[in-house]
Image: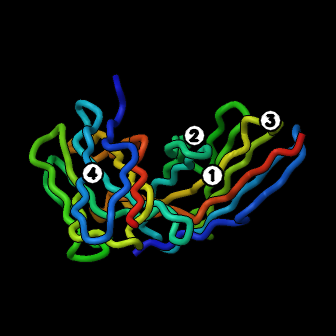
């Protein structure tokens, strides 16, 4: 099955700086890669996703890049703000083999220092 | 739309008791997923359904766990008997499948979760 590794586990950045979170996956058949943000005590919420036919996707301050050859994808947050503080999860899904469920990374606790 | 609805939001029970968690997916969504979240193991997929049919239950930890989806708007996850190591937050998520022959699987939306504590 799929295995997703996520780094770092904790990331502290100054407000206004950029944050980068990286993930690798093991199953070359995976073709959908969402990122979820989870605030303390809340549910995971999708912030951005990318499919394997695209190398990069951007939505305002958030961008995701995908390198299928190397089997890794990254989340980039620019101009970080205090409300960006949360745990971020990457995930991978193999939509080709009928395995619809997401395999999640262990999460990155992002701390924005004022 | 109310989003995915889960009940109860919190459950405290004693070891050996039966626990039933409930989920109502977003109307029109035909896929439903049960996840478990713990500090040690993170977010894990337990089981998912497509059109009310269980597709993959390989994540269900033991025979003590069972899940049903009797219709398109309701699912249950049951633990019998419960054990302290089952303490976790259990999330239900749903998604739609669109496109020709259902080939495009859309975003999964999570419910608020059930926080389970087994004493």
Res. B30 image quadrant: top left
Question: Any mark on residue A81, and which?
Answer: 3
Q: Nearer the viewer, residue B13 or B89?
A: B13
Whether callout 4 and callout 1 share a subunit is answered no
**Image point 28% across, 62% down: which residue?**
B47
Whether callout 4 and callout 2 share a subunit is answered no
Q: Earlier in the sequence, mark 2 or mark 1?
A: 2
Whether callout 2 and callout 3 share a subunit is answered yes
| Marks 3 and 4 close (CB-CB < 8 Å) | no
Alpha carbon distance from label 2 to label 1? 9 Å
| Marks 2 and 1 close (CB-CB < 8 Å) | yes
Question: Which secondary structure, mark 3?
Answer: loop
The disc numbered 4 marks a residue on which chain? Answer: B
Is A63 above or below relative to B65?
above
x%, y% of residue B34? Answer: 32, 55
Is B114 above or below relative to B65?
above
x%, y% of residue B35? Answer: 38, 58
Alpha carbon distance from label 4 to label 2? 27 Å
The residue pinned by badge 4 equals B21
The disc numbered 3 marks a residue on which chain? Answer: A
Q: Earlier in the sequence, mark 2 or mark 3?
A: 2
Alpha carbon distance from label 3 to label 1? 15 Å
Instruction: Characterize the local packing of mark 3: few (<14), some (14-19) or many (20 or more) Cα atoms within 10 angstroms.
Output: some
Question: Which secondary structure, mark 2?
Answer: strand
Alpha carbon distance from label 3 to label 4? 36 Å
The residue pinned by badge 1 equals A88
């Amino acid at each position: 099955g799929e295995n997703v590794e996520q780094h770092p586990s904790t990331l502290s950045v100054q407000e206004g700086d950029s944050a980068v979170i990286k993930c690798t996956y093991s199953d070359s058949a995976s073709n959908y890669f969402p990122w979820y943000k989870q605030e303390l005590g809340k549910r995971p919420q999708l912030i951005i996703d990318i499919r394997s036919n695209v190398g990069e996707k951007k939505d305002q301050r958030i961008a995701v890049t995908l390198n299928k050859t190397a089997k890794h994808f990254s989340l980039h947050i620019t101009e970080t703000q205090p409300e960006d503080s949360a745990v971020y999860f990457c995930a991978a899904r193999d939509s080709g083999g009928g395995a619809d469920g997401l395999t999640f990374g262990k999460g990155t606790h992002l701390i924005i220092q004022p | 739309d109310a989003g995915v609805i889960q009940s109860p939001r919190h459950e405290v029970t004693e070891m050996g008791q039966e626990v039933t968690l409930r989920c109502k997916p977003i109307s029109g969504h035909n896929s439903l997923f049960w996840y478990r979240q713990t500090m040690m193991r993170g977010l894990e997929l337990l089981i998912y359904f497509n059109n009310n049919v269980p597709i993959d239950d390989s994540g269900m930890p033991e025979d003590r766990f069972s899940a049903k989806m009797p219709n398109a708007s309701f699912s249950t996850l049951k633990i019998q008997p419960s054990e302290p190591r089952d303490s976790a937050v259990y999330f239900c998520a749903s998604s739609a499948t669109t496109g020709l022959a259902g080939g495009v699987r859309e975003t999964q939306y999570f419910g608020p979760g059930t926080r389970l504590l087994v004493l």
